[in-house]
Structure formats: structure tokens, C-alpha cells
Image (tube, rainbow, N blue to C red):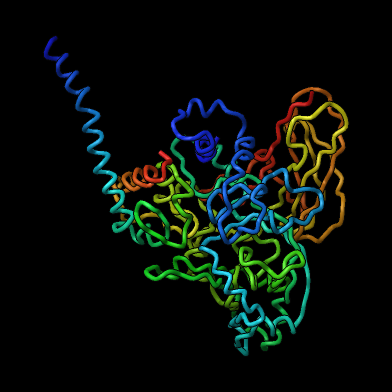
Amino acid sequence: MRLSGLLILTFALTAPINQARSDNAAMALGKKVFLELAEPQCALCHTLADAGSTGPVGPVLDDLKPTADRVRTAVTKGVGPMPANTILTREQIDAVALYISTVTGAR
Amino acid sequence: MGKDLSFGRREFLGAGLTAVAAASVGSSSEVLAQQAAKPLPAYVGWKDPNALIIHSDQTLEMKRDLFGSSLITPEDRLFVRNNVKAPSDSIVADRDGWRVEFAGVKEPKTLTLGDLKRMGVVTLATVLQCSGNGRKYFMDKLSGDQKMSGTPWTVGASGCVIWSGVPLKTVIAALGGQVTGVKYITGTGGEEIPAGLNPKDLIVERSVPLKNLDHVILAWEMNGKPLSVAHGGPLRMIVPGYSGVNNVKYVKTVALTVAQTDARIQSTNYRYHSMTEKPSPDHPAVWEQPVKSWITSPLTDKKAGQVQVTGLALGGMNELARVDVSLDGGKTWKEAKFVGPDLGRFAWRLFVLPAVMKPGEYTLVSRARDAKGNVQPEDSPLNGSGYGYNGWRGPAVKIMVA
């Protein structure tokens, strides 16, 4: 009993830290997807202050403030002239969705 | 409620409130009205900010209570949808000097807008409507795992405007007529494509069937004024009856072509495909607008008594035959009366049904029929990109009469 209680306590204390660590990693990956990994790169078309991008084609993301879900849908299915993704992994899409929705304050 | 609207509420309420608290706040229209203070993007800074719902800097929707009853939509409240950022104002510094290349004719040539103005002039009213107008009504019906991209327009990505320009047919005739074998009119927009991107992915180049040559115009004037950059100035290719994207802004090339363009906006975008299929050139293109109507007044609760129920109806390519209005959500219908001038088959018409309303709850809907017998359906079949919604159920107006 005491051991399992301790384990639960330990988990309860470390889980948020682990969560924060994985969020930080995902945020970093998301920014990398935005600037480098996507094809074409998100930054070529979109303005996003946090990424220092001034892409003039698509909506200004700082104004649009898309939710993570909306980013995922746009990346996966394409929208208007934006192509549907063919190269990013699920993890990379989730990361860029987290990143954009976080730095624009939508999340 | 779509996710975008719940997001709109959150934005209005400020950060920190939970979704549960946000969901308890008034209707979406109230919230949208309260968002009015959002500043307009610079290229449309001259528009009326209180008339527009700003979905993004490239997607601005007119509020539903502003359709009015005078048929023509004023430019300062007309919706905007740009696929690629609008060019700078410098492209209208010398309007008559704008150059348009003509191809697919026996004597290919580049003409200036000044040349075109000397060749002929016609004026005509058309409904300009985003291909995705009404997408929100599709989005509202998606099941849990279905996703749809795009702006959640309701009815306000539409307007009726008057264009003046030269018939394309006149220009083609002056250039020796069409070469043999051509099947499409292909217009290319003058948007700037940033370096590092494949132009074919972004260029706004649309092909429409050649039969439209009878009424396509190259327009330099809208509602009596030189065409603004926001709406395609100095010159726009107007394809009457066709949805917004086919009306190419800043048109710089008009070619009669054997095949449709392979630009992405034509080949795989703006296609009617299912939720599970990837769009391809084999899917039907988003071209002709279907018959459609919606109620424009009343939109809010009323006192009991006489009410004039009004709305707008368009036949797409065809004249309208009639519009029926229901006050009980489609259980019973009465024929409405067209009022005001008939501006031709590509314009919309105002309809009215006078009604004496007793206290109670009402659901106002309208259903249009065109002269060829096409009737507005209750709901449009779902398609993956949410184009061409013309159901009568989606834009229903629920009001209380006391």
C-alpha cells in the first residue's frame, strides 16, 4: 500500500514535468516543421511573428489564430491554394499544430 | 456549432475563460456583431468595418442583415476572397496601360486596357459568390471524425454587382477568331508569386468551357467605379453564372485552350469530391452556380402583426421561375412575389411574402426554382471541400414573435 501510494505521488509530481518537457520538444519540432521540414515551408506563404516569417501568400497566422485542430485539418487536407501534406509524419503535423496554436494564443 | 465560431467566442471573451463558460454565451450572430471592431487589412481599409466579418485577412464576409432590398451590393460591404495576396495599388496607377495577352486566336496579340475600351462596351449584373459560400452548413453536419478545411461562410460571401467591360467575343473576333480545336477559355491572374514556390501551385489560372464565350466580359468597372484592386482591378474576367474563383482578378492572359490548365487551382482544387477521395482532375470542376435563395429579413425577434418576409434568389445560369417561403421550417409553403427590377438571369431577385405573424416560434426558409425546373434541395450533398451549398435548410432563420 505504502509503496503504491508513493508511486502514485511520484507520478503525480513528475507527470506535469514530463508533459512540459514533451510539449517543449513538440514546440521546437513544430517550429522546425514551420520553417524547414514542410514542403513547401509554411513560412514561405504565412506570416507568423514567433517564427520571424513574413510569407505573403496565405492568411496571416497571428491574426487568424487557428486552433490546433484547424491547423491539422488544413495541413492534412489542404485549403484553397495550400496543398495537402504528403511528407510530414503524424508527429510532425501534431507538433506544428501545437506550435502555431500556442504562439498565436489560440490554445 | 463549428469550431471556428466557438473560437470566435473565446476571442471575444478574452483568454482564460473555459469553453463551458463560452458556450453559455448568446448566439453566434450576437458574438459576430460584437467582434466588429477588428481592424480591416490595409488593402481593404476603405471598406466598412462594421459591415464585414473578418475570417482572415483574405476572407471577409458581409453580415447577413446588410443585404438590403435594393439588389445591388455596395462595394464597401461586398465580401472579399483572395486566393493569393492582392497585388499592390501600383497595378492601378496606369489603368489604361494594363496589358493583356490573348492566345488561342488566329492573330495572337497583347492589348492594353485602353485598346479594349475602344473595342466595345457592355454592362451586366451578376451574382458574385464565393464557391464555398454556405460551407458552414456542411461543417455543422460533419460527424466526429470528419474534417473540412476552409472558411465557414454562411450566406454573406455573395453580392450582386454591375460590371462594365468589353465582351470577350468582340476581342476574339478582332483577333481573327479562335484557332481550331479549342474547348476552354483560360484566364490567368496577375498575382505575384513569391520566390521559392512553384508558380503552378499558386497561380490563379482558371479554365471554363468555351460555350461561355457568348457572355464572358473583361470588366474594368464595377457599380459605376473603376474596379478596385480588392475586387480584381484594373481588369477582371467575368464569367456570368459561375462561382467567384472562375472570375479571374487582375487578368493578364486570356487564352482559348484545348485543355484545362494544369495549375493546381484548376486541376485538383475547386473540385467536387467526396469526403474520403483526394480531389483530382477527374472530379467535376466548381463552375456553374446552382439555384439558391435565403431569407434576408426578418432575422431577429419581432412583435406580433404584419411582417414583410424578404429574401434573395439566384438561378445561377438560368432565369428564376418562383420562390416559395415557409414560416414553419418547411412543413407548409407559400409562393412569394418577385419585386423590383429583373436585372437578367445572372443577377439575383428580391422576393417578398407578406405575413401576419401571431406570437410563437417561427423558422423562416425559402426555396427557389429556376425556369428549367431545378429546385433548391433541402440540403446539398456533402462534398469534401464544402463547395456549392444551395440547400434551403442551412440558412433557416429561427425567430420568436411576441
Q: Visible in this render: residue A45?
A: yes
Place of residue B186 in the rendered image (x, y in percent of width and height, measured from the top left): 58, 73
Give the camera-side residue of B219 and B22: B22
How far across and down, in percent of the image, does residue B330 sit?
74, 34
Viewer-closest of B157 and B333: B157
Quarter that holds the C terminus of chain A: top left
> Residue at 80% of width from left, 45% of height from top?
B323
B280 with respect to B366 (left or right): left
Quarter of the image holding residue B243? bottom right
Observer-nearest of B151 and B174: B151
Q: Is residue B186 visible?
A: no
Q: Residue at x 19, y 23 (%)?
A: A11
Tell me where residue B380 appears, x and y as whole percent.
62, 45
Q: Position of residue A57 (x, y in %)?
A: 46, 62
In the figure, A9 relative to B301: above or below? Answer: above
Answer with the quarter of the image where residue A25 lies: top left
Identity of the residue furthest to the top in this view: A1
Q: Residue at x 44, y 50 (%)?
A: A62
In this image, B193 relative to B81: left or right?
left
Q: Is residue B224 left or right of residue B47?
A: right
